[in-house]
Amino acid sequence: MDVVGNRLLVSQLAEDLGWLEEHCRGQDSQADHVGRLRLAAALVRNLIGPFLETQANLPIHVAVVGGAGAGKSTIANMLSGAVLAEANPQAGFTRHPIAYTHGNGQVHWTTHLGFLGPLRKLHIASPSSLDEDVYQVRRVPADDSTMTLLDEFIIWDCPDMTTWAASGYVQRLLEVAALADVIVYVASDERYNDEVPTQFLKLLLEAGKPVITCIVKMREADAAALVAHFQKEVLGRLPAGAVGCLAVPHLTAEQLADPARQAPAYRVPLVNQVAVLGKPASTARRRSVQSAFNFLIRGQDQLLSVARNDLVALNDWRALVQRGQIEFDTRYWNEYLATERFVRFDASLVRLLELLELPGLGKLLSGTLWVVRTPYRLLKGLFTKTLSRPEGGAIPERPVLEAALAGWLDMLRKETARRGEAHPLWVHLDQGFHSGLADLARERFDQGFRAFQMGLADEVERTARNIYEELEKNPVALNTLRGTKFALDVAAISGAVIAGGLNVWDIVLVPLAASVTQQLVELLGKQYVDSQRERARLRQQALATQYLSGPLAEWLAQWPASGGSAFERLHLALRRIPASLQNLAAAVKEKMS
Ligand SMILES: Nc1nc2c(ncn2[C@@H]2O[C@H](COP(=O)(O)OP(=O)(O)OP(=O)(O)O)[C@@H](O)[C@H]2O)c(=O)[nH]1
Ligand SMILES: [Mg+2]
């Protein structure tokens, strides 16, 4: 992929992860995920993005992290070899990240868009207690008499994470932790087992960061036992990845003032450990990028799991909408279609029977038969009249549909209100119902109804017409049927005459035989027309689903995730993140090869 493509990919992925983080921030149950999502986004912005843009491997970044007042600034001084970081008895003194670099060295800061997220670079020297979304760079004067890391490394003194997962300066720490190729984790002898810093350490190890742990301020004599205890009780329960555990016992004021010369016994092992992890730079950087990427891929499900509750609520809503749709369709069938006669089909039956009469000369014969069947017609008319039920007041279609719609929307409104504040989705829907969601649904229904009516008129008319048109278009079949019917009539009449001989009874027998065949033909025709009528009924039900309940259900189901709502954005993020990660995998692989 080209540079522009990669840049777009990186910023979109970081933005989506950032959006999910904000989304979690609003929900108490999801607070644990906030830091993880921020770290994920920062890894993409600060590490993977610049790597894909061929950012130089140097400088290698070292972040000094730990609990409030643990001794981070003190260790940052020790690493940089000069006392420029303000160590202060007030816990939580350092409030923004400070980068220490060589006095002569050029810092090749990445210009990658989104680098260090919200942190602005301070151009005026300020105390480290400045509580703003900034970072600053301090230059350590060159000193040939002490070994230095600063030619190739930047040492970051960071704020603490005691207010872990809360807003504020923890995010500043996460930005730098994501950037870091090496982490130095500082814990004091008294508070090395604190929960919040340990959780943070765990996250860094999960992200595959190489971590040097450093226990400080103990009595020299207790150092070995404390380190062993820390390794067993704290590191033993965390994912592997901690490279080593160093002890820096309580230093004197002189040692604190000039650690490079006064405390080499503690400084040199620490500096060496960092150097081992950070050199050669190209290996260190590739490892950082690869680990970050693995963390994103491995943790994908966990990162996206923050939306699980939202998806459950959204699926509940969709199931409700679907239940309403089934009820709507069933009511339409029971209260309208099942009793609808489709009178148009009766006309088709008449037309079909007419068709079966012989044309031309045959008309004369048919006419004769018609006359012959007069007694039958009169009798049948009499019977049909007595037996047929009076036409009941069939419920007109529109009111049935409207009542079914009202039932559907009422059910949704009640169920939404019943779920109350169980999830923000129901609150959003409840607000929707209070601000005209049902009216909007009715409007959509009306639009659908017009299309439905048009489709319907056409459909019923076509099915009804097909009953005789098919036959009209097929003269061979039509003539065969006509011929068969006529032959039957003739056979029946002649049969009657032959059976009884020519006598007075023929006046009764001949019309009777002609009527029997006619009745038979009518019966067959009626059966055929009825089966078509049933088909039309089913088809009409299908049309109602296609034009009315289907589109409305679709619209209602989508409603919470549309119109610029948070759920719409959520869907976008959930859809895009897996795809972005896949594309990122390809880009990282290409770059590494
Ligand atoms: N005497 C002595 N004091 C120490 C030692 N290590 C740290 N301190 C003191 O402990 C206090 C806190 O140390 P810092 O290095 O400021 O700790 P920090 O982790 O940066 O603290 P915050 O930035 O406030 O979170 C400071 O007053 C340091 O001078 C040590 O080895 N000996
Ligand atoms: Mg500090």
Image: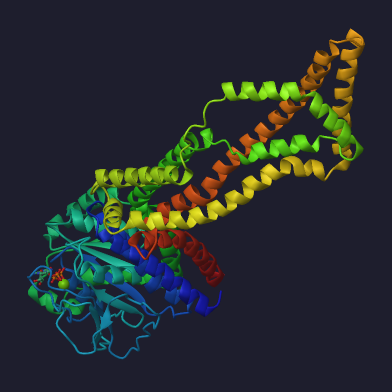
* The furthest residue to the front: 504
Check the image and report above or below for 410 versus 205.
above
Q: Quadrant of residue 442?
A: bottom left
Residue at 48% of width from left, 79% of height from top? 54
Check the image and report above or below for 369 versus 322.
above
Q: In which quarter of the image is residue 130?
A: bottom left
Q: In this view, does 543 lie to the left or right of 269?
A: right
Q: Nearer the viewer, residue 377 or 70?
A: 377
Tell me residue 20's x, y (percent): 34, 61
Q: In which quarter of the image is ligand 2?
A: bottom left
Tell me residue 355's x, y (percent): 79, 38
Tell me residue 296's x, y (percent): 42, 60
Q: Is residue 127 left or right of residue 204?
A: left
Check the image and report above or below for 544 versus 291.
above
Check the image and report above or below for 420 versus 277.
above
Residue at 21% of width from left, 66% of height from top? 167
Q: Which of 87 and 428 is in front in this view?
A: 428
Q: In which quarter of the image is residue 34?
A: bottom left
Q: Is residue 331 visible?
A: yes
Tell me residue 9's x, y (percent): 47, 71
Residue at 60% of width from left, 42% of height from top? 539
Q: Is residue 106 left or right of residue 493?
A: left
In the rendered picture of this protein, how many numbered marks are placed on residues?
Answer: 0
